[in-house]
Amino acid sequence: MRSMFIFSRMRTLLLAGVLLAMTFTVASAAAAESGSEPGVGDAVRELYRSTGVYGFVHGEEHAADHASNGILPGGLGQLVMIGVGCLLIYLAIVKNFEPLLLLPIGFGGILANIPLAGIASEGGVLRGIYEFGIVPPGLFPLLIFMGVGAMTDFGPLIANPKTALLGAAAQFGIFFSLLGALYLSNLLPAIDFSLSDAAAIGIIGGADGPTAIFLAGRLAPDLLGGIAVAAYSYMALVPIIQPPIMKLFTTEAERKIEMKQLRHVSRVEKIIFCFIVMGLCILLLPSATPLIGMLMFGNLIKESGVVERLSKTASNELINIVTILLGLAVGSKLQADKFLAWETLGILALGLVAFCIGTGSGVLLAKLMNLFTREKINPLIGAAGVSAVPMAARVVNKVALDENPHNFLLMHAMGPNVAGVIGSAVAAGVLLRLCQLFAG
């Protein structure tokens, strides 16, 4: 026991000696700059000023690109944002809410708000990842679209083409929120959204995270953190947000409508579909070509059947690597001075409204289509028009099964669901072009 006590005391003395040496080293460097001999008090002060405690208390920012326009002062704001990052990680691990993105976004947000570290500032690692993959041309969202294409089966959409209208209707929330953002700017002096900001916010209604990041990176990079968090948070909350809206706009009889099995779609049809979509995009909306092109390329390498290695890489290893980097890049924009602003609250509110309107629009259009078609469709599948693939389709199937245990709508809902992916990309192209025209 005595030997253990002596060893413990020696270890303590050694640690104290190391700390003292570090203190005098820092003090000597400071004194060399000032031309005076350092004292012990000066050394302790300099050591304290290099700690995170000092950064939180005094809120000092060493990054030139930080602006003090947040709701809370620097140090307190950074503490709050570290708490927000921990909350996102909690939701990802414990609640399983979009863990693939919320986990790296949350950790990136923590890293971005460490005082005096400059991880998300000029020369920092997160800043480097952001500039590489998010700054136009927006490499990360495009690569994710390619991976999504390699994992997507457009067969249900090809088998029942009219469901494409439901995917288009669900994008109505995008344009409603755009107008709402502009109105909010005129209504509240604390909020100032330009047309580009409003367009980037509106795309949240498409419930497509990569599209939202792609458009925000081009039109409103300062709002990227709030837009990305809102988009992925609402996507994760699809099982909570959508069912009440679906039941509000449908009757029990409508929710019990059974649909016949879809026909088989050949590989040739799927390949031709890729080129048809690309051709229409090239002729009518070239500004949407980056997103649509990568989506169709990913689907082509899947459906061609001759490049299985490329298809597996795009849908597994590549998309996983890019997802990690994308999450960290988005997390770098959760800096307190940018995220803790009144505009962020407006983004969260408008994003929720856009998502709800998109869900309701798809259901209502399905009801309208039933007035003119002999073969009735279950209006619930209209809610899958938001492009949260495949979660929205699964929610539709679950609600239908609750009403009728023999009513399986999963494959029917996948039609408008994948149409929503195309629709959100088209909407992003339209908004991008409109902003370019008005800016010019």
Image (cartoon, rainbow, N blue to C red):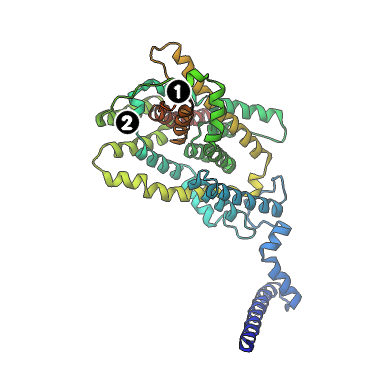
Q: In front: 25, or 56?
A: 56
Q: Position of residue 333 (x, y in %)?
A: 58, 47
**Residue at numbered disc 2:** 274
Using the image, determine if residue 8 lies above or below residue 368. Answer: below
Check disc 1 and report its element: helix, strand or loop: helix
- Most extreme residue toward the front, as rendered? 405
**Residue at numbered disc 1:** 166
The residue at the point 50 percent across, 22 percent down is 363
Q: In front: 17, or 241?
A: 241
Q: In front: 255, or 19?
A: 255
Could you say which quadrant of the image residue 162 lies in? top left
Could you say which quadrant of the image residue 143 lies in? top left
The residue at the point 59 percent across, 41 percent down is 226
- Most extreme residue toward the left, as rendered? 306
Q: Earlier in the sequence, mark 1 or mark 2?
A: 1
Q: Position of residue 256 (x, y in %)?
A: 46, 21
Q: Position of residue 277 (x, y in %)?
A: 35, 28
Q: Is residue 356 left or right of residue 53?
A: left
Q: Nearer the viewer, mark 1 or mark 2?
A: 1
Estimate the spatial distance between the alpha carbons at disc 1 and disc 2, rounded to whole Å.
20 Å
Could you say which quadrant of the image residue 280 lies in? top left
The 10 Å Cα crowd at callout 1, few under 14, some 14 to 19, many 20 or more, is many
Using the image, determine if residue 11 lies above or below residue 305. Answer: below
Q: Are marks 1 and 2 in contact (CB under 8 Å)?
A: no
Check disc 2 and report its element: helix, strand or loop: helix
The residue at the point 69 percent across, 62 percent down is 53
Q: In front: 6, or 215?
A: 6
Q: Is residue 439 visible?
A: no
The 10 Å Cα crowd at callout 2, few under 14, some 14 to 19, many 20 or more, is many
In the rendered structure, which amino acid carries the disc numbered 2? Answer: Cys
